[in-house]
Amino acid sequence: MPDEPRWLNDCERDAWLALAKLVFNLPGALDAQLLRDSRLTLFDYFVLSMLSMTPDRTLRLSELANHIGSSLSRLSNVVKRLEQRDLLRREPDPENSRYTRAVLTDAGWDTVVAAAPGHVAAVRRYVLDGLTEDQVNVLRDIACHVTERLDRTAEQDVRRG
């Protein structure tokens, strides 16, 4: 006979429902702002932003996928679209030709630099404004904790095959 599920208590249920609503609604709000102001999705912005913060504005696609929490196949589709807009380019990795790198172009740099102020304003408006420094630290700690658990579980699932 299977074990009885560990049901959520009232406090846990309220926390979960609040988090679920956040997870469902926040990406759409950030997407809408970026699409309206910069013709970028939130995912596009994360790709360009991550490249803009790396030396030589360059990363292997596998590393880029890992940094932004994406599958390589999803990232490849987005990279193809961004490449068609001349915001980045793909090239073989000179250290290992089995890998492909994404390189932020000057147009991509200009695009992410122009999009950043509006995106940061939206992040402040939707998430950070009104929080104390302690609350921001707790938010960061919780987000990191949950992300680490997701990553660890995904790694275990891959090992189990």
Image: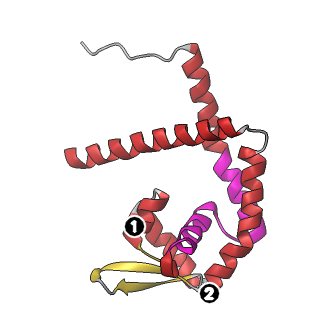
Q: Which mark is residue 130?
A: none
Circle nearer the N terminus (1, 2)? 1
Does 97 sit left or right of 40 as displayed? left
In magenta segment, residue 8: no
CA gap, disc 1 and disc 2: 21 Å
Quadrant hosting residue 49: bottom right
Q: Which residue is label 2 attached to?
A: 106
In magenta segment, residue 45: yes
In the image, 36 versus 128, the foreground residue is 128
Does 8 sit left or right of 100 as displayed? right
At a point 34% along the width and 41% down the height, the residue shown is 153
Residue range highlighted in magenta: 26-54
Q: Position of residue 37 (x, y in %)?
A: 78, 68
- Vertical order, 94 against 114 (above or below): below
Q: Position of residue 135 (x, y in %)?
A: 66, 35
Q: Amino acid at mark 1?
A: Glu
Circle 2 SS class: helix
Q: Which mark is residue 63?
A: 1
Q: Amino acid at mark 2?
A: Asp
At a point 44% along the width and 71% down the height, the residue shown is 76
In the image, 95 versus 26, the foreground residue is 95
In the image, 107 versus 135, the foreground residue is 135
Q: Is residue 127 visible?
A: yes
In the orientation shown, which residue stands out farthest toward the front?
Answer: 133
